[in-house]
Amino acid sequence: MDVPLDKPALDAGPARGRMVIAEEIRRNARDLEQELAWFRRILDTRFKLYFDQECEIQDIFELTPPDLSQSESAYARFVRHYQLSFVERVAVVLALVPHIRPQILDVFFTRNHTFDRKFAEFGGIRQGPEGDFWPTGETLAFIVGGADLELRFALQALFDVHHVFVKHNILRLVPLRGEDQPAIKAPLRISQEYLVFFTTGQSHRPDFGVDFPAQYIETRLSWDSLVLHPGTIKQIEDIQTWIEHGETLMVDWGMAAKLRPGYRSLFYGPPGTGKTMTACLLGKSTGRDVYKVDLSLMVSKYIGETEKNLAKVFDQAQHKGWILFFDEADALFGKRGETKAAHDRYANQEVSFLLQRIETFDGLTILASNLKENLDNAFARRFESMIYFPVPRPEERLRLWKQGFSAKAKLDDALDLDQIARDHVLTGGSIMNIIRYVSLQALKEGNRKIAPDDVLQGIRREYAKEGKAG
């Protein structure tokens, strides 16, 4: 999330974690109660002015919003971070009301029933099992401007693609499916992420599925557990440098006008050499969420659907500092062929669309492939780094064997891991598969020692999976 958020100290223990979360909720509830009271006064004033009723205030802009300058709630930090204007703040509260205090909007039903006609200028739609009033852009225009056309027109800027509301996926006007209508008549929606943030103070991770075909991944391991070639490690350190100092370079040094946002890297090498684990560790060590894009949900045979699925991921990831990890990327980003048929043309359009989104994404994008040559040359020119993950050398394989076994495993004195590491060229993933197999066999046989024959049998099984001779 673009707004700074101090994560709760959950590692201090469950009870301590609950207390921190409860404090965040208390702060948000306190500040939002003030916002709702302010919003009620605005709503009451608007109706009185619109229906020429007696009112002490002649302009809703005289109703000063609550002072949240000293509050540390998530909502207050958000208001300060974006320096919201009066109208922007009204828009945010209006979008929140259906979720946290829907009865406030019942006044629109009351006014419509009091008179002989339905007031189209109120906007809104009925939604949900109870037929609640759901505000639209029209509702916001009425509250802010009444019948003032100038203010109505000015509101359009709030939902422009360059406004922070849309750019940072905070709130937007979402047209109903199958309805062709003016944008201002579309329902006003706040994103689930910011709804959770404003109420609990916690960051919300989108649910994996068709609407967000990327899955949050993490690791319990540390950098010490990752065994890589020194040259590979050096290049990974360059990515860490960008994560830690990229914002300073772009903002403080003023390079945003000269450099593309974000960072793009290609991880290539045989399966099981540590590409996915490296992506997870980059996220863990820098406090960034890592999302693995599911290409089976991403790629569609229907024209234009693949681009839509890509957009779903990139739109949500923008401005949040996420790491997007495309495993087996050549399935989607492979070399473009000659345009001999309509299918080829659309496939090439998908690659072009991805290129454009990757170039404008301000986070870290990692594409993983078994072979660098499989990827389209247009991608190669756009990577800040291309990092090779080779099959580990004997000394690296020995480290993998030694640190792979559990401390509770009993190794036979005759088991020469140094010899096994020299004689058998295996990746880290394959070695761990073998260790899993022989450890389970040892437990099955009554926690006996792991002997050389056990390991050799595991190696033969792994070679057979790869179609190699044992």
Image (spheres, rainbow, N blue to C red):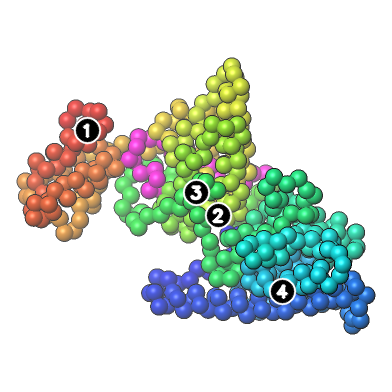
Per the rendering, the mark at residue 104 is 4
Q: Which of these two is toward me, 411 or 176? A: 176
Q: Which of these two is toward me, 160 or 6? A: 160
272 inside magenta stretch: yes
Q: Quadrant of the N terminus?
A: bottom right
Question: Which amino acid lies under the numbered mark 3 shown in the image of this protein?
Answer: Gly
Q: Quadrant of residue 351?
A: top right
The residue depicted at 37 percent of the width and 38 percent of the height is 389
- Give the Cα distance between marks 2 and 1: 40 Å
Q: Which of these two is toward me, 439 or 398? A: 439
Q: Quadrant of the C terminus?
A: top left
- Give the Cα distance between marks 4 and 1: 67 Å
The residue depicted at 54 percent of the width and 31 percent of the height is 301
Q: Which residue is mark 2?
A: 321
Q: Quadrant of residue 192?
A: bottom right
Q: Secondary structure at mark 4?
A: helix
Q: Earlier in the sequence, mark 2 or mark 4?
A: 4
Question: Which amino acid lies under the numbered mark 2 shown in the image of this protein?
Answer: Gly
Quick check: can you spot residue 81? no
Question: Which amino acid lies under the numbered mark 4 shown in the image of this protein?
Answer: Ile
Q: Earlier in the sequence, mark 3 or mark 4?
A: 4
The image shows residue 469, relative to residue 229, as above or below, that is above
- Give the Cα distance between marks 3 and 4: 34 Å
Q: Secondary structure at mark 2?
A: loop
Question: Which amino acid lies under the numbered mark 1 shown in the image of this protein?
Answer: Tyr
Q: Earlier in the sequence, mark 3 or mark 2?
A: 3
Q: Nearer the viewer, mark 3 or mark 2?
A: 3
Q: Earlier in the sequence, mark 2 or mark 1?
A: 2
Q: Which residue is mark 3?
A: 209
